[in-house]
Image (spheres, grey):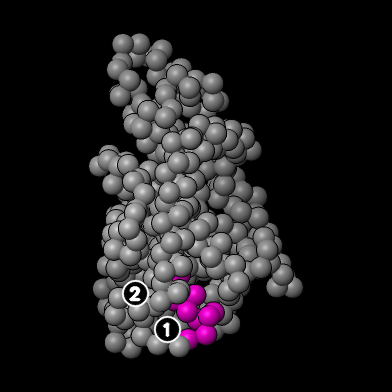
Amino acid sequence: MTSELGDIGFGYRPRAAYACDPARSRGRLFDEAESPTRTPFQRDRDRIIHSTAFRRLKHKTQVFVAHEGDHYRTRLTHTIEVAQIARALARALCVDEDLAEAVALVHDFGHTPFGHTGEDALNEKMTLWGGFDHNAQSLRVVTRLERRYAEFDGLNLTWETLEGLVKHNGPLTDAAGRGLKGPVPRAILDYSELHDLELSRYASIEAQCAAIADDIAYNTHDIDDGIRSGLISLDMLEAVGLPGSILKGVRERYPALDAVRTGHELMRRQITMMVEDVIVTAKTNLARLSPGSPDAVRGAGETVVRFSDEMALAEKELKTFLYARLYRHPEVMRVRADAEQIVKDLFDAYFADPRAMPDGWREGLDRAEARIKARDVADFIAGMTDTYALKEHRRLFDRTPDLS
């Protein structure tokens, strides 16, 4: 173990050899003077938190449309939960917590209003111009669309944070550059030509911590929101392996516990079980692979921070349950259909007449080629909150669906 920043004086924290060292960051696309008080990864985290895109997450859908109730999770509350779990994993594995947190905080920046429904709608509308992918959109936000600094567009994040953003779920291409899950979005390819993100290699341990933290957070907290909504119940969960076994233990120990507290016990115990499983599995993988550097992790040929085989099967069963009983519930699907129409209507209206867009977006679009106009319209809509999308639809159309 070595000091996190070695010889440049940011204090001591144990750091494994396979951890990303901020003192040896591959830098930023635009050179900047280093901070005397913060590491490069801490600066990334701070820039992300102070961005406009981060604030917008407050009013973007996770599962339930944001205005349906104050107790449901939004993209912002989900993001904070992911960041907390990512930091816990990074700490346990002796890697850089700030980098893990930065990747977790930025991972949902590209999500549209109304969650995956909005993404599907924009992807359909953008079929002729390269489609729409929320991960590529996150990269566009932090490299182009945020305009806060005098000397560059975007947030000018470090290579390590951008690598984690783009590749936290694994490599995008094979060694020959062929997309592993279809064509790689143009925004990612274009940026990688400027600042090679090594798309055929795995991401850092820190980024992998953020990715698995995302799975842990939504697999657990979507249960909570589903119970609050009345679309699923504790009794339904008894037949699902992981939450069912936890519920059995809670009820045996606390037979008179009310349903609300029982649900909270389920949530916290499930998070703990999943986190501890990942830590044990990752440490086992690290002992087997013995990576001596962050690059050794990137070249390991496998995801190091993952669930055990047993937990992976339990998590897959839980996802199947959530898709059937929550994400595809008729009431959720009804709202999704209306939300999809709102996004499509907005795209058609702005594409037909860019003058319907506000100042700063519409200039020159009426004369732009279709590809440029379509991408700018998609950028504008993707940045909307649920509430702003509804407001714009009411302004432009005589009838707007009721999403309540």
Tag 2: residue type? Met
Q: What stretch of residues is rendered in magenta?
A: 368-379
Classify mark 1: helix, strand or loop: helix
Q: Nearer the viewer, residue 135 or 40?
A: 135
Q: CA distance from mark 1 to mark 2?
A: 10 Å
Seen in the picture, residue 122 relative to 312 is either above or below; the reply is below
Asked if residue 354 lies left or right of residue 178, the reply is left
The residue that label 2 is drawn on is 357
The 10 Å Cα crowd at callout 2, few under 14, some 14 to 19, many 20 or more, is: some
Whichever of callouts 1 and 2 sits on the residue coming sooner in the sequence is 2
Pointer 1 with pointer 2, Cβ within 8 A: yes
Q: Residue at x 47, y 79 (%)?
A: 373
Q: Nearer the viewer, residue 349 or 203?
A: 349
The residue that label 1 is drawn on is 365
Seen in the picture, residue 234 relative to 103 is either above or below; the reply is above
Q: Residue at x 49, y 35 (%)?
A: 329
Q: Nearer the viewer, residue 271 or 66?
A: 66
Tag 1: residue type? Leu
Report the predominant secondary structure element of the magenta stretch: helix
The picture places residue 9, in percent across and down from the top left corner, at: 31, 73
- The single residue placed furthest to the front in the displayed view is 398
Classify mark 2: helix, strand or loop: loop
The picture places residue 357, in percent across and down from the top left corner, at: 34, 74
